[in-house]
């Protein structure tokens, strides 16, 4: 036998072994029906394709598990949960960016306090100006009403121009009073925002310092 003949026989034998190998064996599945009964089969019937099942090898050992198909409600719930998780992750990233900007803009608490104090000063000036405006409008209206009352007491007709001035003064007093209330409300909101911002700044600053200390320790 030549060397080439021996090689051909060996190759043919290898091919026969490959054809007869267990890889060509059929798969075996195990699943449980709605009544709790366990089934074994080389194929999954149509009515069980959505059931959880296991794929077994020739030794009966599980080689693959397939979870049951989710219901429409479960899929909807899963999608909603995924969307909410993505939304929360996006919010967390945005908060992190804002915190970084906060520390960059205000290297220490004193800088943040100065920024708020400037806003408080501007609001206080606006409020004081509005209060003076209210007092001025009140005096003008009081004077006009006194003048009209004097004319009536004297038996004279109050001119239309006086009545018009009275109505104008009343309207301006109302507008100025509402403006004052808005500015005072803005100051209260700023006060609350200031208190919250200081607490948050201290937390962010402490966390940043802790992380820096941890990096320095490595």
Image (cartoon, rainbow, N blue to C red):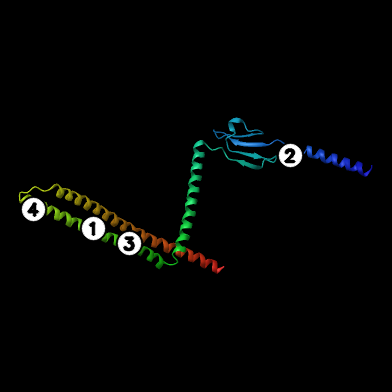
Q: Earlier in the sequence, mark 1 or mark 3?
A: 3
Q: Earlier in the sequence, mark 2 or mark 4?
A: 2
- Give the quadrant of residue 18: top right
Q: Earlier in the sequence, mark 4 or mark 3?
A: 3
Q: Is residue 171 left or right of residue 145?
A: right
Residue 58, position as x, y percentages in the image: 70, 39
Mark 4 or mark 1, whichever is nearer to me: 4
The residues tagged by marks 2 and 4 sit, at their Cα atoms, a distance apart of: 116 Å
Query: Helix or strand or loop: what does disc 2 sit on?
Result: helix
Residue appearing at x 29%, y 54% in the figure: 182
Q: Earlier in the sequence, mark 4 or mark 1?
A: 1
The quadrant in which the C terminus is found is bottom right
Q: List the residue tagged with mark 3.
A: 122
Q: Is residue 200 left or right of residue 135?
A: right
Q: List the residue tagged with mark 2.
A: 23
Q: List the residue tagged with mark 1.
A: 133
* Above or below, 100 relative to 54: below
* Above or below, 35 relative to 176: above
Q: List the residue tagged with mark 4.
A: 150
Q: Is residue 59 left or right of residue 18?
A: left
């Amino acid at each position: 036998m030549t060397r080439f003949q021996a090689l051909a026989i060996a190759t043919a034998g290898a091919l026969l072994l490959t054809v007869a190998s267990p890889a060509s064996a059929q798969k075996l599945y195990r699943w449980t029906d709605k009544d709790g009964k366990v089934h074994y089969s080389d194929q999954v019937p149509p009515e069980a394709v959505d059931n959880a099942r296991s794929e077994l090898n020739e030794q009966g050992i599980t080689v693959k598990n397939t979870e049951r198909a989710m219901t429409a409600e479960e899929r909807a719930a899963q999608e909603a949960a995924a969307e909410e998780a993505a939304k929360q992750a996006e919010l967390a990233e945005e908060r992190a960016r804002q915190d970084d900007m906060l520390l960059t803009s205000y290297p220490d608490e004193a800088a943040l306090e100065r920024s708020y104090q400037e806003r408080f000063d501007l609001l206080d000036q606006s409020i004081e100006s509005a209060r003076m405006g209210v007092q001025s409008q009140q005096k003008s209206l009081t004077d006009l009403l006194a003048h009209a009352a004097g004319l009536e007491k004297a038996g004279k007709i109050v001119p239309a121009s006086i009545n018009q001035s009275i109505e104008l003064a009343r309207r301006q007093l109302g507008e100025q009073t509402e403006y004052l209330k808005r500015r005072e409300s803005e100051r209260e909101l700023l006060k609350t925002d200031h208190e919250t911002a200081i607490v948050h700044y201290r937390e962010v600053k402490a966390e940043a310092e802790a992380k820096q200390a941890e990096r320095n320790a490595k």
